[in-house]
Amino acid sequence: QVQLVESGGGLVQPGGSLRLSCAASESIFSFNVMAWYRQAPGKDRELVAALSNSGITTYTASVKGRFTISRDIPKNLVFLQMNSLKPEDTAVYYCYSSKLQSRYWGQGTQVTVSS
């Protein structure tokens, strides 16, 4: 069973930065895609950023130019660098991966942007 473990969340002031990490229990190169989702209170879970096996990245419009998804293949890590954070970025952030017909989720890490 694939395990994804997020870390790096916390409390940050508006305009600040955080870097989230997702550690996978097996080679991330085996996944079709790895991504970050987020869910704010009372809202649906939404895709934030995705990284395909071939290295193509996609971002939701609200984070373009502020967030960057990247990976360290030898270490089985995926990152989400978040800059210029806004209060509306406050949410639980989840790591996600898919392989063949299977989908996997991490347990989530809380990001709170507040002064």
Image (tube, grey):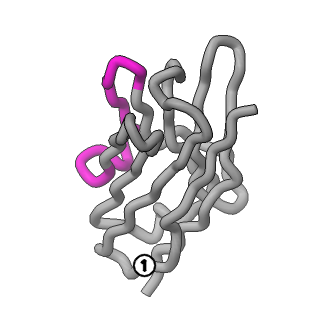
Residue at 40% across, 30% down:
51
The percent coordinates of residue 23 (x first, y second) are 54, 48
Q: Which residue is more in the foreground, 95 or 113?
A: 95
Query: Considering only vertical position in the picture, is 23 above or below 109?
Result: above
The percent coordinates of residue 45 (x first, y second) are 64, 44
Query: Considering only vertical position in the picture, is 44 above or below 57?
Result: below
Residue at 29% across, 74% down:
15
- Counting labels gives 1
Q: Residue furthest top?
A: 100
Q: Residue furthest left?
A: 65
Residue at 51% across, 43% down:
36
Three-letter code for the amino acid on which mark 1 is drawn: Val
Query: Considering only vertical position in the picture, is 65 above or below 32?
Result: below
User: For mark 1, does the 10 Å Cα neighbourhood hold few (<14), some (14 to 19), or many (20 or more) residues?
Assistant: some
Q: Is residue 66 magenta?
A: yes
Label 1 secondary element:
strand
Residue 14 position by quadrant? bottom left
Q: Which residue is more in the foreground, 17 or 46?
A: 17
Query: In the rendered view of the protein, which quadrant contains the N terminus?
Result: top right
Left or right: 14, with 8 as reference point: left
Residue at 60% across, 49% down:
94
Residue where numbered disc 1 is placed = 12
Q: Residue furthest front?
A: 74
The magenta segment is: 52-67
The percent coordinates of residue 97 (x first, y second) are 58, 31
Q: Which residue is more in the foreground, 1 or 15?
A: 1
The percent coordinates of residue 93 (x first, y second) are 57, 55
Q: Is residue 59 magenta?
A: yes
Q: Residue furthest right?
A: 1
Query: In the rendered view of the protein, which quadrant contains the C terminus?
Result: bottom left
